């Protein structure tokens, strides 16, 4: 099933630099949950807890030297294998057998580079794939916006912000230094010549991403057919109805109702809610459709308000238009249809962005002419 969500549409990622993640350092004798703030390359999460020693190191604001990070990463992987009852990170068909999203970037880098010689080739491959998935998740929404606006500076800024979050070992590598230099050159190039990508540079990870990324419209899709999504939602709603009935209650969809158990839509992602709002498969009641539309509308308003607030507190005059474009590009096709977000809405936001850019260019040109005239 693909209906559990990370929450409503969020604020534009180009306005955030929170790409880090707390390392999970395994204590195989207990269980618990750990926060996640970046996409993972696998959906089969296995939960482990942070060891007492690791908690002490985190409380001191450090996760130790490389030897400590390597040892803890080794322990974390072994705990994941025990919890999932597997012997390695990959299944026989090469797909992930465990979810590495609980390891932070520094731990993943230690695994990917075989720190201390403690990791297998499969573990190195899995860690490298997880690192790439996180980087791609940062760049993907920026690429979707840039394809519409022609402004590639934001994707380079996001990439620079992300790579600068590397640990000390990664920063000391020649590959890291080459990447930073290439990204700085790329940012300078797209700033000097807006709308044009820089010349190919083998060290430029943005260029590599753009050469391989799939999907040009940036719509958030999970790969599952919308009819299958609808079936999953139907099953989940029926489960809520049964749980309510077991307690002698009716599952209700109107918050104003004084009796019954109110449906919980918070765990459904926007595409799943869209399947209900569009009544995919003709399997949802009018109450369910109305509730799904109301929840989608609430989430969309939250995203729009966030764009307004970010624009108001930003010195970038493009901020509001970028926020709207980002919101549009992150919607699935079904979500756009359910919320009546037509291409005309997108085109208007792009037009506003381009008008702002033209005005800024004219002002800069006028400033230069006046400066030359009056010296």
Image (cartoon, grey):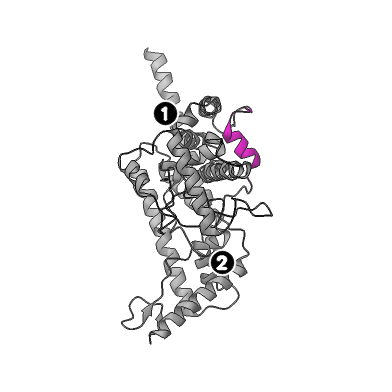
Q: Residue 114, percent across and down?
A: 56, 36
Q: Residue furthest bottom?
A: 248
At 42% from the left and 14% from the top, the residue drawn is 372
- Residue at disc 1, secondary structure: helix
Q: Residue furthest front?
A: 29
* 305 and 344: which is toward the camera: 305
Calculate the distance from the C-alpha at mark 1 to the C-alpha at mark 2: 53 Å
- Residue at disc 2, secondary structure: loop
Say left or right for 261 vs 76: left
Q: Quadrant of the C terminus?
A: top left
* 323 and 41: which is toward the camera: 41
In this rendering, does residue 45 appear at all?
no
- The dot on residue 1 is 2
In this rendering, does residue 53 appear at all?
yes
Q: Residue furthest right?
A: 93
Q: Residue 57, percent across and down?
A: 34, 41
Mark 2 crowdedness (10 Å alpha carbons): few <14, some 14-19, many ≥20? few
For marks 1 and 2, the one nearer the N-term is 2
- The dot on residue 363 is 1
Say left or right for 289 vs 310: right
Q: Residue furthest top?
A: 375
* Magenta span of residues: 200-214
């Amino acid at each position: 099933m693909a209906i559990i969500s990370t929450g409503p549409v969020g604020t534009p990622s180009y306005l955030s630099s929170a790409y880090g993640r707390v390392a999970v350092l395994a204590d195989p004798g207990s269980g618990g949950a750990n926060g996640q703030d970046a996409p993972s390359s696998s959906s089969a999460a296995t939960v482990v807890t942070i060891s007492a020693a690791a908690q002490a190191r985190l409380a001191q604001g450090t996760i130790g030297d490389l030897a400590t990070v390597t040892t803890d990463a080794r322990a974390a992987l072994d705990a994941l294998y025990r919890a999932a009852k597997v012997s390695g990170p990959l299944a026989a068909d090469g797909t992930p057998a465990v979810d590495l999203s609980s390891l932070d970037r520094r731990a993943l880098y230690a695994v990917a580079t075989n720190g201390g010689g403690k990791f297998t080739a499969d573990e190195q491959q899995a860690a490298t794939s997880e690192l790439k998935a996180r980087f791609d998740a940062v760049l993907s929404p920026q690429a979707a916006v840039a394809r519409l606006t022609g402004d590639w500076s934001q994707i380079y800024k996001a990439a620079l912000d992300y790579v600068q979050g590397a640990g000390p070992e990664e920063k000391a590598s020649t590959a890291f230094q080459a990447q930073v230099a290439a990204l700085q050159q790329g940012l300078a190039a797209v700033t000097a010549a807006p709308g044009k990508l820089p010349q190919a540079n083998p060290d430029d990870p943005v260029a590599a991403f753009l050469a391989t990324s799939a999907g040009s419209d940036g719509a958030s899709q999970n790969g599952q057919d919308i009819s299958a999504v609808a079936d999953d939602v139907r099953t989940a709603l029926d489960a809520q109805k049964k749980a309510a009935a077991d307690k002698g209650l009716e599952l209700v969809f109107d918050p104003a109702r004084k009796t019954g158990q109110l449906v919980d839509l918070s765990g459904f992602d926007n595409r799943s809610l869209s399947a209900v709002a569009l009544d995919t498969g003709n399997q949802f009641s009018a109450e369910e459709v109305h509730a799904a539309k109301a929840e989608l509308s609430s989430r969309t308003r939250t995203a729009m308000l966030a764009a307004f607030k970010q624009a108001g507190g930003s010195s970038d005059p493009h901020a509001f238009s970028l926020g709207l474009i980002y919101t549009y590009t992150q919607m699935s096709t079904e979500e756009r249809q359910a919320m009546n977000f037509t291409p005309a809405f997108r085109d208007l936001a792009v037009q506003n962005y381009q008008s702002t850019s033209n005005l800024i260019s004219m002002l800069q040109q006028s400033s230069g002419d006046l400066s030359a005239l009056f010296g």
